[in-house]
Amino acid sequence: MKNTFGIIYSKPFYILIAIGIFFFLFLPLIIVSEFLFLEPFLAFSIYPETTLSFSLIVTLSFLSSLAVSMNIYRVKLIKETKKIGSSIVGTIVGASAGACSCGPIAFSIIATFGTAGSIVSSFLTIYEIPIRLTSIGILGIVIFVTSKSLSRECKVKF
Amino acid sequence: MVDTKKIAVAGAAVVLVAILVTFATSYMSDFDTPRTSTTEGEFQKLELKQAPVLGSKTATVAIIEVGDYQCHMCKLWFEETRPQIIENYINTGKANLVFVDMPFLGSDSIPASEATYCADDQGKYWEYHSMLFTYQEDEIDGGWASATRLQAFAFNLGLDIEQFDKCMTTDDHFARVNYNKQVAVTEFGANSTPMFMIVNTDNGKAQRIVGAHPYSTFEDVINSLL
C-alpha cells in the first residue's frame, strides 16, 4: 500500500490534484459549517462543542482528496472507472452532513420544500457526526481497495 | 445494454454539482443587499419599540439578534459569545440587545417565540429566552419545545400558569412573531440564523454580521460604532 502511494504521489500532478480537491471541499465545508467567516472580517472560530465536527471535516476532505486523486490515476492507467463512483458517493454523503444547520442552505431548502425540507434539514443536522463517520468509512474502504487493486494491476502491467 | 455503474457515477456527479450550485447560490445570497435601505450605514429606525431590551435603552449601540429558538448555532452563540458581550458592553451601558424572532426551522419554533412574549406579559422575557436556549436539544421539533415543555419552562420560572396557558392557546402574540419574522427577512435580508445588526442609535450607522461569529468580531464592530 505504501508503495502504491509512493508511485502515485511521486508525480507532482497527482499531489496538485489532491491538494486542489482538499481545498475544494475543505473551504466550502468550513464556511457552511460556520468555522470560517468572510464578513465583516475574516474570522475563524471553533467552539469546544464543534471540535469533533471540524476534525471530521479535515479528515473527510483529506480522504476525499486521496480517494479521488488515486482513482484518477487508476482511470488514466487502466482506463476503468469502476471505483471512482464510490469515492464520489462517499464525498457527497460526507459533504451533505451538517451542511444544513441554521444557515442559508437550510433556509433555501425549507423555503422551497416546506415541511419535507425541514425534516431533511433536521435529519442532516442531527446525524451530522454519524453521516460524516459513514462517509469517512466509505472513503477509507475506497482508498484501501483502490490501493490493493493498483498494486495488483501495476504488477501485471509492468 | 446500459451500464448501471456509469449511470450511478453520472447520477452522483449530478448530485455533487447540484449541491455545489445550491451552496454557491445560498452562500452568495448572503452578499446581496437587503431588500430595503436597511443596510450598512443607512439603518432606518424600525417598529421594534415594543421589543424587550436587555440593557440600557439609551445605550449608544443596539445589537439586534435575529434568531430561531431551535437553531443550534444560536445556542452556541448564546453560550459562548453572548456572556462576554453582556459583561463588557451591556452591563457597562455601552450597548443593549434586542432579539428578533425568525422562526423557520420547524413547527415548534413559532410557539417557542410566542411563549417568550407570553412570559414577557409577566415580566420574564429574558429569563424565558435564556431558558429556551439553555434547554434546547439537538433535534428540531423533537419535543423539547412542545406545548407541555413550554408550559413546564413557564412553571419553573414561577409564571402564572393560567395566564400563560391562556396567552398560548389564544395565540396572543402570533401576529407579533410573524411581524418579527417579516422584519428579519425583508428589512434585514436575513436568510440564516443567527444574524446580527449592530447599530449606532445616534447616527444610524450599522454593520451586519451573519453567523455565530466569535466575540472578537463583535468587539471590533461594536468598538468601531461607539
Image (spheres, coloured by chain):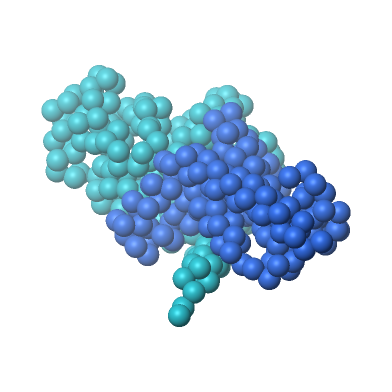
Chain colours: A blue, B cyan
Q: Nearer the viewer, residue B108 or A2?
A: A2
Q: Is residue A97 left or right of residue B207?
A: left
Q: Residue at x 21, y 35 (%)?
A: B147
Going by the image, does B15 lie left or right of B103?
right
Between A41 and A97, the one lying in front of the other is A97
Q: Position of residue B221 (x, y in %)?
A: 66, 43
* Along the viewing direction, whichever of B98 and B23 lies nearer the viewer: B23
The location of residue B204, given as percent across then percent down, is 58, 52
Q: Residue, x 38% and y 47% (percent of image)?
A: A122
Whether residue B98 is situated above or below residue B46 in the rendered picture? above
Task: Report the side of A127 relative to A9 (left or right).
Answer: left
Q: Quadrant of residue B72?
A: top left
Q: Nearer the viewer, residue A23 or B69?
A: A23
What residue occupies the far front of the structure in this picture?
A156
Q: Residue at x 37, y 64 (%)?
A: A112
Residue under the point 56% across and 62% down? A85
